[in-house]
Amino acid sequence: MSAKAKKRGGRRVLHATTVIALLAGSAYLTVELRKDEQAKAPAVQAITDTPDLTSAGDARSGEQKWERLKNPERSVLRSGSGAVLATFTDGARTATLTGPSRTFSEPTSTKSRVVTENWVRLMPEPWKKDAEKEKWFKDWFEEFYGSEEDDLFAFAFQYVEGAPVKEDDEGTPYAGDADFGPINPEGSEGADYRLEQSDFYDYLGIPYTFRDGTTIQPEQNKYRAIDCSGFIRTVFGYRGRFPLMADDKSGDGLPRTANGMARSSTGTDIIKLKGSTPFERPKSISVLQPGDLVFFKLDARTKERLDHVGMYMGVDTDGHQIFVSSREEVNGPTIGDKGGTSRLDGNGYYAKTLRSAKRL
């Protein structure tokens, strides 16, 4: 073989080696980027365990007993060994069922992780004493006890930062990372920086007709945005099918604003408003149950109006009582720390401004 041919052959070998090295490097970077993306993605339903005591068989095989409790009036279903299987509150459609353990986290905004066996669902009717004997409840319980179908917690985490887009059969995105609202041209960083009043129909970008016949058109600049009450209406109403009002005044169902929700006769008040403006901070929040709506008084300018709402999720792995809400500082739904940690215990910003709670 000539020297020139050997040189060409050497170049081919070198070229092939370079290509392989580049491909290997590219593959490594792709894997590492995916790992990084996965690390930042919210853990929506990481099911980690199925407790023996909470199997569907234990709840339906006759090994159960009902108990009535007060403050608030409620019925608790227990297994034969005494473990709580489900809780139903008089006047509320929200039920808390015990099931497989899940982890909810939001790595981009907080180190907090909520590991819970609570599955929060809406019953077709408000609970009342002895409702466990009625057919509607038996049918509902048979369908949902032990089910891993998305519940209200799962719905909520489908809108936090990094949540993937989900589309319906018509191609309309109904879930995915949501903003709080568009930038306010007259606001400033830290003070009314983003506009409020983004509801679920704005997020969806489609007109919505309410049960009273009112049709509201979405605002284009609020597409993919939901403010604090809009987030709750998305989770409980649009996704959970709880009836919705077009505003705070007409019809029955869940009102449009945090203040309207807090003062509505819908559901059961768990922590009632006390005192006068700016109202009193609750002395105890031990009555809270996962799925409860929690209401806050954040802005002195709103006078007697409560101006923020979130959903209580339970206790995180550090022992703090955590809630999820859509917030201006984070620009969307979060259990994060920016603008104040999402804790109801202690003396943090939201703990100090908590005023009442309701179970829908």
Image (tube, rainbow, N blue to C red):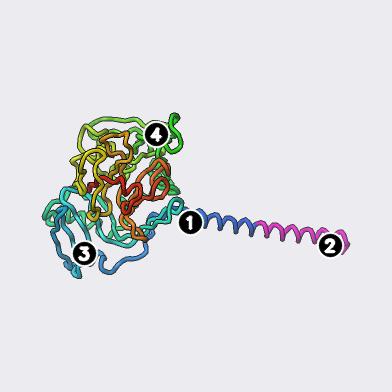
The CA distance from mark 4 to mark 3 is 47 Å
Dot 1 corresponds to which residue?
A: 39
Instruction: Sort mark 2 into few (<14), some (14-19) or many (20+) by Cα contacts within 10 Å.
Output: few
> Mark 2: which amino acid?
Lys
> Mark 1: which amino acid?
Ala
Instruction: Give the secondary structure at mark 2.
Output: helix
- The residue segment tinted magenta is 1-22
In depth, the one of 207 and 170 nearer the eye is 207
Instruction: Sort mark 4 into few (<14), some (14-19) or many (20+) by Cα contacts within 10 Å.
Output: some
Sequence-wise first label, 4 or 3:
3
Question: Mark 2, mark 4: which one is toward the viewer?
Answer: 4
Dot 4 corresponds to which residue?
A: 195
Dot 3 corresponds to which residue?
A: 59
Residue 337's spot in the image, x, y percent? 41, 50
Sequence-wise first label, 1 or 3:
1
Residue for point 33% across, 47% down: 350
Q: Answer with left or right where residue 191 lies relative to residue 261.
A: right
**Picture layout, residue 208 above or below residue 340:** above
Judged from this view, the residue extending furthest toward the right is: 2
Sequence-wise first label, 4 or 1:
1
Dot 2 corresponds to which residue?
A: 6
The CA distance from mark 2 to mark 4 is 70 Å
Instruction: Give the secondary structure at mark 1.
Output: helix
Sequence-wise first label, 2 or 3:
2
